[in-house]
Image: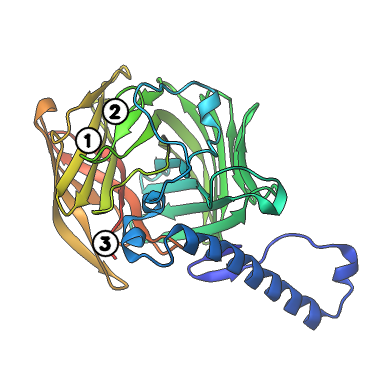
Amino acid sequence: MNVEHGRHVVRGRCPRRLRRLPRSIFRKMKELVAVAAGIIWLTGLVALMGHGDMAVRAQGFAGLGTRADGFAQARAGVRPVFPRDHGAHPDFRIEWWYLTANLKDAEGRDFGVQWTLFRLALRPGEADGWQSPQLWMGHAAVTSADTHRFAERRARGGIGQAGVRLDPFTAWIDNWVMTGADDLSRLRLAARGRDWSYNLELRADGPIVLHGDAGYSVKSPDGQASHYYSQPHYRASGRLVLSGRDIQVSGDGWLDREWSSQPLSADQEGWDWFSLRFDSGEKLMAFRLRGDGGDFTAATWIDPTGEATALPEGSFRAEPLTPAKQGGHRTPVRWKIRLPDRGLDAVVEALNPHAWMRTSVPYWEGPVRVNGTHTGVGYLEMTGYD
């Protein structure tokens, strides 16, 4: 099922004999198929969310892993193995392939692009066809200073509508595709919405970065954790089509890979996640998880050669400065960030304050600018502000 700005769209071909039916009957059948697909998908989502648990909803997609019985758990000392771990991990409950890019056109105007594929497991174990416990969800967006276009795709596992495979690496949901070399050194990216699309090529000029302890990323004092790595060194180029305008763009991309069965503790109400590229050539991944017992933060500093250093919990400090209101949400879109260990003292500000993703699991996601001791661009994701 496809969704754009809350609108359901049926796509795809049907058998020729059905196309001979009267148009009114055929249209009704399409509507029924869309409704049935939506019920199947949303029933699974409700099951994952604990029958409507709003605390889980506030945590965002990661909150769907609050119940983990029977699933594999992230473990310290288990280092990712490539290219195997670029693929799916169905024995874990949740997982994502998450690419963002900061781009400019020939006139210097800024754009942001998001391409994300989420995998969710209804229950432990695997099965074929419609019995597969896997659900898939895709999010894509194009954002500029004055527009934010986004769409969502949903699919059941086991029927070829969505998935991830290797040799060559390909992640897809419907006609949204991320594909390329098995080592992720090269990627092609494509997504399309109602009045927008993008096609990008990306080439990495630096190494993959393992976060935390060799890819084991702790998310709370209670020990919740995930396996987490990034490829933050992409050079990107290609074209956007936005409201009929064909726009050539170039810039930088960042891919995040993460999988877990219980990444957040029950008292954590949301997170603020930063991926920042500084003009100095340095990069920063940092997050703040907000909970009843206080904030939990972590960060990875990446030098211009690509060497990464995991910084101690609590060393990254993030203070919300300015909120934006949209559709009942009050979301901080201007932040003060500090990292004393690296001399960082800067302000992070959204390119477009209204980059709210009104999807099945709502959150804010958009490009940002950085000014202060360090200047640059990046992406910010925020959950738990609804």
Quadrant where the image shows the C terminus: bottom left
Q: Amino acid at mark 1?
A: Ala
Quadrant where the image shows the N terminus: bottom right
Q: Position of residue 137 (x, y in %)?
A: 53, 53
Extreme residue toward the front, this view: 70
What kind of element bears circle 3? loop
Q: Residue at point 31% right, 57% down?
A: 352
* Occupied quadrant, residue 315: top left
**Residue 298 shows which numbered tag?**
1
State yes or no: discs 3 and 1 in contact (Cβ < 8 Å).
no
Q: Which residue is mark 3?
A: 385
**Label 2 crowd bin: few (<14), some (14–19), many (20+), radius 10 Å:** many
**What is the spatial separation of the Cα atoms under label 1 and label 2, in whole angstroms?**
8 Å
Q: Amino acid at mark 2?
A: Gly
Q: Residue at point 17% right, 33% down?
A: 313
Instruction: Please state which of residues 35 and 234 is positioned toward the viewer in this rendering.
Output: 35
State yes or no: discs 1 and 2 in contact (Cβ < 8 Å).
yes
Q: Position of residue 328 (x, y in %)?
A: 28, 73
Q: Is residue 309 above or below residue 120?
A: above
* Horizontal side, residue 142 vs residue 379: left or right: right
**What is the spatial separation of the Cα atoms under label 3 and label 2, in whole angstroms?**
26 Å
Q: Is residue 289 above or below residue 278?
A: below
Q: Position of residue 41 (x, y in %)?
A: 57, 62
Q: Residue at point 21% right, 42% down?
A: 370
Q: Position of residue 199 (x, y in %)?
A: 56, 43
User: Which-is-in-front pick, marks 3 and 2?
Assistant: 2
The mark that comes first in sequence, 3 or 2, is: 2
Instruction: Please state which of residues 208 and 103 is positioned toward the viewer in this rendering.
Output: 208
What kind of element bears circle 2? loop
Q: Which residue is mark 2?
A: 212
